[in-house]
Image (spheres, grey):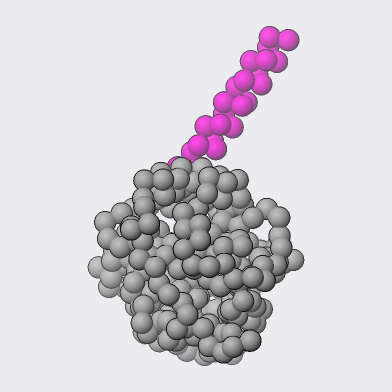
């Protein structure tokens, strides 16, 4: 009996250390990025671009506005994106959708365990700071370390620490409102980008097979992160998923690792001509 108890304690201890190890090594906050972009999806949808040294931005998304959902899903109202996530069983849809809308790369996203469609728009300035429940008790790609960092960040900040961006000028239409991607991109390009990636001076070529519009959205996301896109090219050869190609030297840079982490592509060491990195979009 004592032997079994020791085995159990040892097993629990190993599992605990492994969980902590994964939380630490997978933490976005410990990667040394200039900004951390976070989405809290729910009845009151907010996008935060957090910066400990400069400006923190906050965007409130109305549930009734239509946005493009990357991946061939077309347009959905913001309040219905969570339902699509539930049906498709692909939480990454939240990350990619709000990355496209904000022309940035979203790091962390949170969404409720119970799925519903939100029809009513929440007023701006309502519940600006995420609650303890939102940070710790919702579904997320955040590790425990990230959740603790966010809890500390939000509990030590105040309303004056955030610059709220009004999205009203970028909502086109009346009863069938669509988000104005190009208008938002032109005005706020560079607001959420990482200075580190500019210092590397590494550029990207995007190769697409189907949709120029999707390739353009992705280029705006990458540019918004601070990584320069130099070319959009079309090709007839279809591949499954997506592919990142670069040389051995560039493959060790933070720029390449950032794209690899976000897009979850197959990786290939090879020759590039037009750019330092080639992002090949698949089916």
Q: Is 148 included in the stretch rendered in magenta?
A: no
Left or right of residue 99: residue 139: right
At 50% from the left edge and 53% from the top edge, which residue is drawn?
A: 130
Depth check: give the residue in front, 110 or 219.
110
Q: Which residues are magenta?
A: 1-25
Left/right placement of residue 1 relative to residue 128 reads right
Quadrant where the N terminus is found in the figure: top right
Q: Nearer the viewer, residue 213 or 231?
A: 213
Q: Depth check: 16 or 251 in front?
A: 16
Residue under the image location 36 percent in, 82 percent down? 187
Residue 239 spot, x, y in % from top left: 61, 78
Q: Residue at x 63, y 86 (%)?
A: 175
Whether 267 is drawn above or below 212: the answer is above
Can residue 267 be seen by looking at this rendering?
no
Residue 128 seen = yes
Check the picture and name the quadrant holding the C terminus.
Answer: bottom right
- Indicate whether 68 appears above or below 146: below
Q: Is 165 left or right of 53, judged from the image as shown?
A: right
Q: Quadrant of residue 274?
A: bottom left
**Image quadrant of residue 203?**
bottom left
Main SS of the magenta segment? helix
* x 39%, y 68%: residue: 164
Number of marks in the rendered image: 0
Reply yes or no: does residue 6 show up in magenta. Answer: yes
**In this view of the protein, which residue sits in the foreground, 237 or 111?**
111
């Amino acid at each position: 009996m004592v032997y079994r108890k020791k085995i159990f304690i040892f097993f629990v201890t190993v599992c605990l250390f492994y969980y902590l190890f994964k939380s630490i090594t997978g933490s976005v906050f410990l990667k040394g990025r200039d900004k951390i972009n976070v989405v809290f999806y729910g009845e009151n949808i907010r996008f935060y671009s957090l910066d400990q040294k400069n400006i923190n931005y906050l965007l409130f998304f109305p549930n009734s506005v239509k946005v493009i959902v990357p991946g061939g899903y077309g347009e959905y109202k913001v309040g219905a994106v969570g339902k699509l996530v539930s049906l498709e069983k692909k939480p990454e849809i939240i990350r990619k959708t709000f990355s496209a809308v904000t022309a940035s790369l979203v790091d962390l996203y949170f969404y409720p365990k119970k799925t519903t469609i939100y029809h009513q728009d929440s007023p701006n300035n309502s519940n600006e700071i995420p609650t303890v429940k939102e940070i710790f008790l919702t579904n997320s790609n955040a590790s425990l370390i990230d959740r603790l960092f966010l809890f500390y960040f939000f509990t030590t900040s105040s309303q004056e620490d955030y610059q709220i961006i009004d999205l009203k000028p970028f909502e086109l239409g009346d009863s069938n409102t669509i988000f104005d991607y190009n208008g938002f991109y032109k005005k706020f390009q560079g607001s959420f980008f990482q200075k580190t990636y500019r210092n590397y001076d590494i550029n990207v070529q995007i190769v697409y097979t189907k949709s120029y519009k999707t390739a353009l959205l992705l280029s705006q996301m990458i540019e918004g992160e601070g990584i320069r896109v130099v070319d959009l090219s079309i090709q007839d050869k279809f591949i499954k998923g997506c592919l990142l190609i670069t040389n051995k030297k560039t493959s060790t840079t933070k720029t390449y690792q950032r794209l690899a982490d976000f897009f979850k592509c197959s990786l290939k060491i090879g020759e590039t001509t037009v750019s330092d990195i080639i992002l090949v979009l698949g089916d």
